[in-house]
């Protein structure tokens, strides 16, 4: 079987009903009444979602292993298990008020690709693996794409273990608990050699839907910087303390947010600037706020702009601190990532051969693929989502698009796993 005929065989073996059924099963774990999902990293829901996929793997006889950060790898062995595998995958953790597709779709499409290839009886030279990356969202423990960052060596285990949630629990403790419950074979080393990585994902924006296309071949993932800003003042009585004697952390933080939104003002609407968390302590109506923690998520496709504006975040906060103290910590600094041209061409070719409408696209959201791209040739396949919305319970992708994406993915990973020139 040539790589070309095998990839069509793999795509043809994708079972759309099975994919949609698996999606429904996964979406039930952490389902919220508004149709969304709450399945944050390291929670009971994260554990149960992993167990579901581990169960599917066990039924197929595929081995499941993890690295020390519980990034999981499910393997369909090839004829040459000694060669670096072809890896696909995404994440199954969600935002606190998330949807049922962000991340989950890439894991389910990857799993469907593995099953389709297995059903079609295709012998691949390289093994094909499904990766499930830990804490991609970074909502509870910052930053986003934590698991792949640790895997790629962009963050150390010691650094991420110290990350703490709003209740003061650390990511290190949360990971230890998760590992106790899952009893995983922790056998994989960080950054083990991979031949290629391909991630399927919903677009999370409106471009594919507007253009009437089914697949996006992703060119670049825009860069982003994350900051945690702690403002410290002094509690005092709201009814008695004169203005001049106040050290109100909230008033200082509000002024900082104003200064930052001026800094980030962009008439061309390319800058993305978000303050997504704002915590006030002690949080009593008649007490002057002593502590504020807020976060900044700043994104841009141009690394020069990321540097120029991002480097001023601390300066602006200091200038607006008044009588309060401020500490600015940067938890993520990721430049724009250009994905692999050759595999992206394989995505376009597979779309063409399967008769699926496709276009090139850039990613406004970030993905584990950006760290994998530093380790091996990496590509991404997008499918549309309704009204372009994501990180909301309203997130939705059509079954027909989910199936089309899984077919393209199955074709591409098959082609990558069969062809072994000069080895
Ligand atoms: O933040 C992001 O773009 C992604 O959802 N992790
Ligand atoms: Mn995602
Ligand atoms: Mn997300």
Image: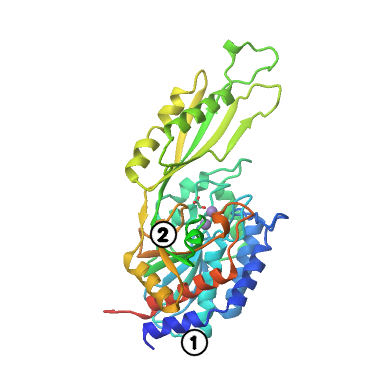
Q: Position of residue 236 (x, y in %)?
A: 65, 18
Looking at the image, which residue sits at the far left? 422
Which of the 4 image quarters holds residue 104? Answer: bottom right
Q: Mark 1 points at which residue?
A: 121
Splitting the image into 4 quarters, where does residue 193 fall?
Answer: bottom left
Work out whether 180 lies above or below 272: below
| Number of the label disc, if any, that sits on residue 34 | none
Eyeballing the image, is 362 above or below 58?
Answer: above
Crowding near pointer 2: few (<14 within 10 Å), some, many (20+)? Answer: some
The residue at the point 45 percent across, 52 percent down is 364
Q: Distance between the residues labelled 2 and 1?
A: 33 Å
Q: Is residue 59 above or below residue 303?
A: below
**Most foreground residue, 345 or 235:** 345
Instruction: Give the number of the disc on residue 361.
Output: 2
Q: Quadrant of the N terminus?
A: bottom left
Q: Residue 145 appears at what percent x and percent y?
A: 48, 53
- Spot the residue most to the bottom: 1
Q: In this view, does 331 lie above or below 98?
A: above
Query: Measured from the top left, where is residue 367 in percent x and y?
Result: 46, 56
Does any portion of residue 232 appear in the rendered image? yes
Q: Which of marks 2 and 1 is in front?
A: 2
């Amino acid at each position: 079987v040539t790589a070309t005929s095998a990839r069509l065989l793999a795509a043809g073996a994708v079972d759309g009903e099975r994919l949609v059924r698996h999606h429904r099963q996964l979406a039930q774990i952490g389902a919220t009444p508004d149709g969304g999902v709450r399945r944050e990293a390291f929670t009971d829901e994260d554990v149960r979602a992993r167990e579901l996929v581990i169960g599917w793997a066990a039924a197929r006889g595929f081995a499941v292993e993890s690295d020390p950060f519980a990034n999981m790898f499910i393997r369909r062995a090839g004829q040459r298990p000694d060669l670096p595998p072809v890896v696909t995958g995404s994440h199954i953790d969600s935002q606190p008020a998330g949807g049922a597709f962000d991340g989950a779709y890439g894991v389910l499409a990857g799993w469907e690709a593995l099953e389709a290839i297995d059903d079609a009886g295709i012998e691949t030279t390289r093994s094909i693996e499904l990766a499930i990356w830990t804490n991609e969202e970074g909502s509870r423990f910052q930053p986003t794409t934590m698991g792949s960052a640790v895997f790629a060596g962009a963050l150390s285990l010691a650094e991420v273990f110290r990350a703490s949630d709003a209740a003061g629990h650390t990511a290190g403790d949360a990971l230890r608990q998760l590992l106790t419950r899952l009893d995983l074979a922790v056998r994989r080393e960080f950054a083990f050699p991979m031949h290629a990585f391909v991630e399927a994902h919903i677009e999370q924006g409106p471009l594919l839907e507007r253009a009437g296309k089914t697949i996006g071949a992703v060119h670049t993932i825009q860069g982003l910087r994350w900051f945690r800003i702690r403002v410290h003042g002094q509690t005092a009585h709201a009814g008695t303390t004169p203005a001049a004697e106040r050290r109100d952390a909230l008033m200082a933080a509000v002024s900082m947010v104003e200064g930052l939104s001026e800094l980030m003002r962009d008439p061309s609407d390319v800058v993305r600037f978000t303050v997504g968390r704002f915590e006030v302590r002690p949080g009593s109506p008649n007490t002057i706020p002593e502590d504020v923690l807020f976060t900044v998520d700043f994104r841009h496709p141009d690394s020069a702009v990321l540097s120029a504006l991002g480097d001023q975040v601390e300066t602006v906060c200091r200038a607006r601190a008044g009588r309060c103290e401020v500490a600015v910590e940067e938890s993520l600094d990721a430049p724009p990532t250009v994905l692999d041209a050759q595999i992206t061409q394989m995505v376009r070719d597979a779309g063409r051969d399967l008769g699926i409408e496709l276009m090139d696209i850039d990613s406004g959201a970030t993905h584990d693929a950006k760290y994998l791209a530093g380790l091996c040739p990496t590509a991404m396949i997008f499918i549309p989502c309704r009204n372009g919305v994501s990180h909301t319970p309203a997130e939705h992708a059509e079954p027909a698009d989910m199936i089309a994406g899984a077919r393209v993915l199955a074709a591409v990973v098959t082609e990558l796993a069969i062809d072994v020139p000069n080895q």
